[in-house]
Image (cartoon, rainbow, N blue to C red):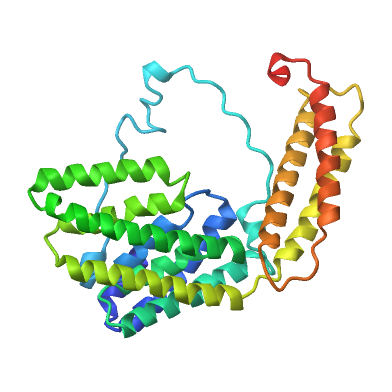
Amino acid sequence: MGAALVSASLIACAPLLVLFASLVAAAQKVLCDAARTGPPGSIVLTFVSSTAFFVPQRLGESRPASVSSRPPAHWPGSSAWPPRCCARRAPVPEPRPVPGVRARLRPGSPLVPVGARVAVGATLAGWASLALGSAHPYWAVVTAAAVFQANTTLSWQRAVQRALGNLLGLLLFTALLPLTRTGEIALVLVTLVLQIGAEAVMARNYWLGSMCVTPMALLLGEFAGTHPAGGLVADRWTDTLVGVTTGLPVCALVTNRRAADRIEAALTRAAAARTTASALPGSAHPGDEAARTARDRLAAALGELREAADAAAGEWWQRPLPRDRVAREEDEGRWVLAALAGRDTSPVAAG
């Protein structure tokens, strides 16, 4: 937000703002994928920052608001934490050992081509939107950034889902606009209903979630004042098509040939974790520290192997993938995990 608002206050060149917004979107995509934040990934961050690049600003308005250096008494870490009603809390399970963010961003990381796709595709989409006269080029940037998924196949699927969801969302926005302009209460209630719908269906079906998010995003602009509906709908649909049609060719041209290398590294880690777990003495109880660590390490390695295999399988222009080796390593790893679980006679393991 800071970079976006400062750029908006200092730069009057819209194509340059599009470029900077796209670079920030690429960084957000790579960092969120490396940290495995899960859905919705970087798209919310990208929407907020890309919009901020085009908010009219003066430099003096971009400074952060002052905050109290002393947190409220009910904040975690203060002397009054935890509250009396929560003084006895269940222990938090230890996380599984997985490669950290820094390891996933090492030179040669398969996330680098993904970031390049976002940077190039979002920039071209924003420039195309400006060339077509859109007043909201950041919508094209966000659409292109949202299209790019773990591989080419998933990106094509996401593009179709987003285009369909946005089209239906624009139709819903047009139908609801007369109701929302009857008064402030109606505007608030309709926006809340759309928010609930987005939260309820987004994780299950992306295009249904987009159908709720699109009119909600447009209605949020109505809180500051009414806008011509025709221009909003035309710009949103144009920018959606521009983002999709620009992002997909970039996805096909900027191939991720490092995805196969990720499988090799994942195979090596899975084999090492399986060997360590297999070497445990038969008398070792699964509750022992060494057994628990070996089990968690093997489970995490198998999960990473499956993720790497799925990502590489959806990329085109790849060298042959070691599918047989992946299947064999997964089978052998599961047998070792099952053997470790079989030693545990606790009710939790039985369940």
Picture quadrant of residue 193: top left
Q: Position of residue 348 (x, y in %)?
A: 68, 18
Residue 49 shows in the view = yes
Identify whether 70 is placed above or below 147: above
In the rendered image, the quadrant that contains the C terminus is top right
Identify whether 209 is placed above or below 51: above
Question: Position of 275 compared to 67: left or right?
Answer: right
Looking at the picture, tell me which residue is in the foreground, 267 or 324: 324
Q: Position of residue 317 (x, y in %)?
A: 71, 74
Question: Position of 39 compared to 94: left or right?
Answer: left
Looking at the picture, tell me which residue is in the foreground, 240 or 135: 240
Looking at the picture, tell me which residue is in the foreground, 105 or 121: 121
Q: Residue at position x 70%, y 64% from top?
A: 259
Picture quadrant of residue 152: bottom right
Q: Position of residue 342 (x, y in %)?
A: 82, 23
Q: Residue at position x 19%, y 42% from top?
A: 189
Q: Position of residue 60 (x, y in %)?
A: 21, 69
In the rendered image, the quadrant that contains the N terminus is bottom left
Question: Position of 227 compared to 285: left or right?
Answer: left
Question: Position of 304 compared to 19: left or right?
Answer: right
Residue 64 shows in the view = no
Looking at the picture, tell me which residue is in the foreground, 256 or 32: 256
